[in-house]
Amino acid sequence: MTGSTALLTDRYELTMLDASLADGTYARESVFEVFGRRLPLGRRYGVVAGTGRLLELINRFRFGDAELDWLRAEHVVSAHTLDWLADYRFTGTITGYREGEVYFPGSPILTVEAPFAEGVILETLVLSVLNYDSAIATAASRMVHAAAGRPIAEMGSRRANEDAAVAATRAAFIAGFSASSNLEAGRVWGIPTMGTAAHAFTLLHDTEEEAFRSQVAAMGVGTTLLVDTYDVAEGIETAIRVAGPELGGVRLDSGDLPKLVGKVRAQLDALGATGTKITVTNDLDEYAIAALSASPVDSYGVGTSLVTGSGAPAAGMVYKLVAHKTDEGEWIPVAKKSDGKASVGGRKVPIRHLDSSGTATAEVVHVLTTRPPRDAGRELLVTLMADGEADASFVGAGGVAAARLHNAKAIDELPEEAFRLGAGDPALHTLFV
């Protein structure tokens, strides 16, 4: 999508804008904060993703003639508000956790500082990006850890809408996936792409052997052959007869994988194909990958579970006003008191505490009064956008590559209990001081 993103929002964003323009509060300098009250499904950490994508979408958050004409026809806001929207561009500052950073309940992941009118209408766009991308990156991170260093590829494009598929690929790559089948993700975000053939290619030919010969002729003996269209043992025998013992790999997409993989490895070795790799797919998630940890699997491909967040398709983040200036120019904190949804008002500076070995021990969030905190931990906030201009280092393919590197460092700081797959408490406590 290359056009305006201004109507990727909820109606109440614009009706709040309309009312604040009418009563004069629209210009109050405000601080909005993105955080999650909890981690989904008892997970022990989350991974921030989508930030670079969001910065580019905010840059396109403009109301052109088409958007304004539709709002006018639908009587969404007043004529005065339409005039204000015609000149809208975000001019504020956005700070937050680096993309790829890990987070915990209450972590101030993103902070938007701007006049109320400029900041409030970004809520839905901000949350739609961060909630989905961070959910995917968190699930992907768990899968990467379960894979224990074995390559893992994203193959879920057919299980999500077309835009979400590209976003999911991007988030998974940041969290450590090695490649994707999605070509658009490769073109836009610089992610390595991979893929060979599906069952349809085998079924197209009169015999499995003809299909394998065709694929090897087109792609060379280093290709990966899908050997479970019919009988796996016969498929492997045929694959080695066609490609020889230098065949690059075989892929398994069905069956009782823990048992099947061992048999396949033994058969390949007996045929002299000791260097032929085994890739498994077949509706994998982090639990299935962990169950294969003792099997001679060389790489994994994950689809449905990845693009649906492995049961948690949204990260549960919210966007709340936490401070604003009074008419007298004084900053005051504001917060919800609702039962079960209370928030902490005020500007915040999060610091990650590390022990002498470099392992994270706590997430300490300083609620600012008049002095900045003096804390020896690792500062987590960076400036992502200043005066409405995004920091170029966080966007595009370069931003994705930087986020992937940062994620690896942040994951390396986590204590070992963070990687348990069973539901449990967050790996770090979030302390507000």
Image (cartoon, rainbow, N blue to C red):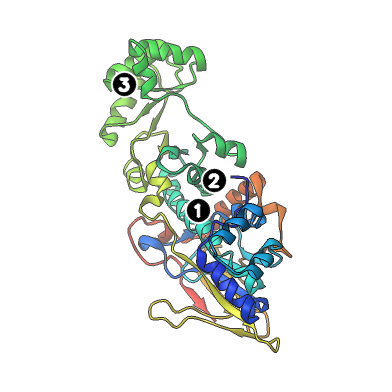
CB contact under 8 Å: marks 1 and 2: yes
Label of residue 267 in the image: 3
Image side of residue 10 versus residue 56, left or right: left
Report the amino acid beneath label 1.
Asp
- At label 3, counting other C-alpha atoms closer than 10 Å, the crowd grade (few under 14, some 14-19, many 20 or more) is some
Occupied quadrant, residue 86:
bottom right
Image side of residue 4 versus residue 415, left or right: right
Image side of residue 193 versus residue 92, left or right: left
Residue appearing at x 45%, y 83% in the figure: 337
CB contact under 8 Å: marks 1 and 3: no
Residue appearing at x 70%, y 86% in the figure: 329
Residue appearing at x 40%, y 49% in the figure: 308
Provide the residue designation for mark 1: 133
* Mark 2 and mark 3: Cα distance apart in space: 37 Å
Image spot of residue 120 (x, y percent): 58, 69
Note whether residue 4 is visible: yes
* Mark 1 and mark 3: Cα distance apart in space: 41 Å
User: Could you say which is closer to the camera, residue 147 or residue 301?
Assistant: 301
Quadrant containing the C terminus in the rendered view: bottom right
Image spot of residue 62 (x, y percent): 66, 57
Provide the residue designation for mark 2: 170
* Mark 1 and mark 2: Cα distance apart in space: 8 Å
